[in-house]
Amino acid sequence: MQLTIDNLTKEFTTDAGEHIVALSDINLEIRDSEFICLLGPSGCGKTTLLRIIGGLDQPSSGQVILDNQVITRPNPRMAMIFQEYSLYPWRNVLDNTAFGLELNGMSREERYAVAKRYLDLVGLTEFSQSFPYELSGGMRQRVAVVRALAVEPAVLLMDEPFGALDAQTRNKLQHDLVDIWEKTKKTILFVTHSVDEAVFLADRIVVLSPRPGRICENIPIEQPRPRDRTSVEFAQVRRHVLDLISLK
Amino acid sequence: MKAITLMVVACAVIAIVLFTAGCTQPAGQPTSSNVTLQKSSVSLVYMNPGQMPQLLATGQVDGYMAWQPFVSIADVSKIGTVVSYSQDLPPKQVWEDHSCDSLVARNDIVSAHPDMTNALSAVFVEATNYTRNNPDRAAEISADWLFGSSNLTYGNVTINSVDVEKASIPTIKFTNDPSDQWITSNDRFIGALKEIGFISGTLSNVTPNASHAMLYNFVPYNTANGMLATKTIVSPTTAPAKISIGYLLSDHDAPLFVAVKNWKYFLDNYGFALKPKVDTAGKVEQAELIVNNQKVADVQLVKGDGGPQLMTLLGSNTIDFAVAGTPPTIAAVDKGTPIKILFPVHTEGSGLVVTSKSSAKDWNSFIAWINERSASGKPVKIAVAPKGSIQDVQLEYALEQSGVAVTEAK
Amino acid sequence: MRWYLKIISPVLLLVAWEIAAIAVNNEFILPRVGSVFVVLLQPTKDILGSGSLLDNAIISLTRVVSGFLLGIVVAIPIGIGMGRVRWINDMVDPVIELIRPIPPIAWIPLALAWFKIGLASILFIIFIGSFFPVLLNTIDGVRRVNRTWIETAYMYGAKELQLLVKVIIPAAAPTIWTGIRVGFGIAWMSVVAAEMLPGTTSGLGYLIMYSYNFGQVQVIIAGMIVIGIIGLGIDIFLKEVERRKFRWQGLER
């Protein structure tokens, strides 16, 4: 799996006539099974970049290439997990999880079996008949993750998926995500504005500057996992990243 | 300071204006000081007869002039006393045999299907004869058709619809003869309608004779009579698959009800009938026209809410025939609706009733009572069928002849 | 506890009615509760040769349901089209806004002219009454479907038809259902207007008008009460369906 972002720019004109450059000259190579965090302040274009990579938006110039295929629309090898409104409230957990499989025409028996397997993975089997409104925020996001995993994508695109959760749940889910990543070896592109989160999760942190969004830093994190948030090493890495960012 | 002065002055002006207005009498209201100088007057309020019995019983009107069976409803329930039937209204004999409901037909139907029209006319003629000669049976049929033979409740009084019909039918003259008096009464109605401005088209500037040509087509009637005299009805060779006949909710249209409900009698004796598709109690919607024992056409019977509505339905080709009053028919012909009157279905059959509490028992005591009430500043209030109707024209004419002024209640 | 409260106001209304009727002492202005209930308590008895309350209620209900279903079947697809496709909306909306304010009653002459006397003209009037609330709510519900839900479906490779059936319609369903509730209420109100059409000889609206023609006030009021009760009953039913099928609405995340 080779994901390349080549000379990508995104600009547009607002209703008021203003000309905005959201992203400028983005060049990025993502290797198989890498866990990349896109880090930056609000409004720096990281969500825009993620959406373009996923095929939901088009670049103004430049390309996204996945294994020699130019991406201009959603691709079955990439799955996206959003921060809010991720699950369909009128479907129960099982039907939500099986959603992608259902769209692909898998029979009900088969897709329920697959879905149950993935729900097992995150310990939500007993909730398969529940509805999203009966679940906590953390449980819902877990379902969103396994729904994505169920279609066996090569790449997971995640847009601040834990941003709306409380700190404890957030930490737990970060931990669970690393677990899942280690088990499934998916390539993950994770957008966040939290340095702590990025340092905990990423193999590599790609830092975007505020508008126009440019890659201003590319920081590899070599700490072995699982990383201890309270350790001295963690704090050092964190300090290092912050320094690099604040210099810009 | 200036603003306050301005406001005070404005308030004073407004107060003065209101005070003056309050003290001024609205025109036409008799006061005790000037009644001896003015004619007596009656206040007329126009409406559909449906509510008239209630209003009479609750004292909201002092009397009403309407078509049957509303006159007999007041009579039988003792809510009111009959002052005069329409044919007896003054001036003497002017309204004898006056026109009321007739069979009206679309010109295109008559010219395309003359034999069918003649046969249908024959059915009506015999049905009218039967109605005239068998008033009790006609009353039962009318009560069944209009009311399901059930009771009518007006407040504390409950009366049976059959009793009402038995009292009403004899007051209606069931005849198809377009007599001279019948034609003259129509001329009078044309004059009256012109006066109130309901006629402004083709009928407004013609001589009476010219108007007759525009209003009447007696060919089917005469042909039907001829056929009945020789007991040979010509079988129609053409007919539409379905014809629609509109009618009104009144026992004025009893001949139609009799033709349908008593179909066996007509079939046995004449070979023709308006046979109901389903033999039910109450009103019939679907029937068949049978001539010489053969079915000629399906017949749809459409209950109308009033003469003008039936005219609209004729004009939009929704119905083919209607049993309707002559004034709306005259107004429709004036506007250019391509219809003509074939023959009357009855004459006479309306009446004036007043509250039983009054001293009025006939026309003269009625006028005396009007004068009395006018003099005491509480003019009599009479409900009457809508402006331009036969009842309205007759009543206003009679009052005028008796020297009473008419005001319209607002 | 709540159901006690709900009974109180109708009971109070009946008491007030009876007191007022006794005070007015005039059966024409305000009949006594008793005389109206005599009619109501004999729902199978024929009235003025026009059928019983029960028969006429069933006939009116059948007509309204038919006209209403017709309205839904036409309004929902148009609403989805207008909600999803901008140019369809821009093209159709001006006509809709022009026709919408016209009350069903005003359509009676045209209904007669186009559909002649018979069931079709009645259904047309009821159709007009039901159409607009359902249409407008469908458009609104479809427009307001959360963009993320739609993009999620696209990400999973949904084709347009799948998107429509598996996302748009379920997401818009609660709003559409509200439109259905409102639309049915209006359709049921249109029944009196529709049954005024000439040639009608059955139905609650017809019974009321016929009794009006002969001044039978207690039948008129009894008819009005039946119309009110049926309307209420159906609304309760529709609300209950909403409560059960759309429980998930509590959560919009």
Image (tube, helix red, strand yellow):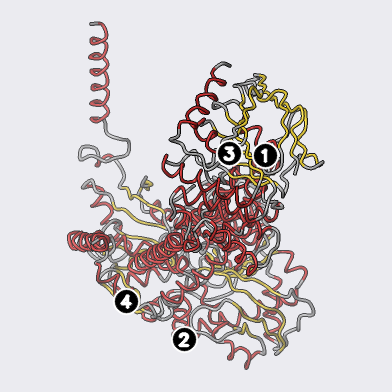
Nearer to us of marks 4 and 2 is 4
Element under disc 2: helix
Rendered view: B182 above or below B242: above
Name the residue tied to disc 1: C90
Identify which residue, C109 or A175, lies in the foreground: A175
Rendered view: A121 above or below A240: below
Name the residue tied to disc 2: B137
Nearer to us of marks 1 and 2 is 1
Element under disc 3: strand
The kind of residue on which mark 2 rests is Arg
Pointer 4 chain: C
Q: Are marks 1 and 4 on the same chain?
A: yes
Nearer to us of marks 4 and 3 is 3
Element under disc 4: loop
Element under disc 1: helix
Report how far apart the C-alphas of labels 1 and 2 lie in the structure: 66 Å
The quadrant the C terminus of chain A occupies is top right
Counting from the top left corner in percent of width and height, residue C69 is at 58, 63
The kind of residue on which mark 4 rests is Leu
Q: Is residue A115 left or right of residue B369?
A: right
Pointer 1 chain: C
Nearer to us of marks 1 and 3 is 3
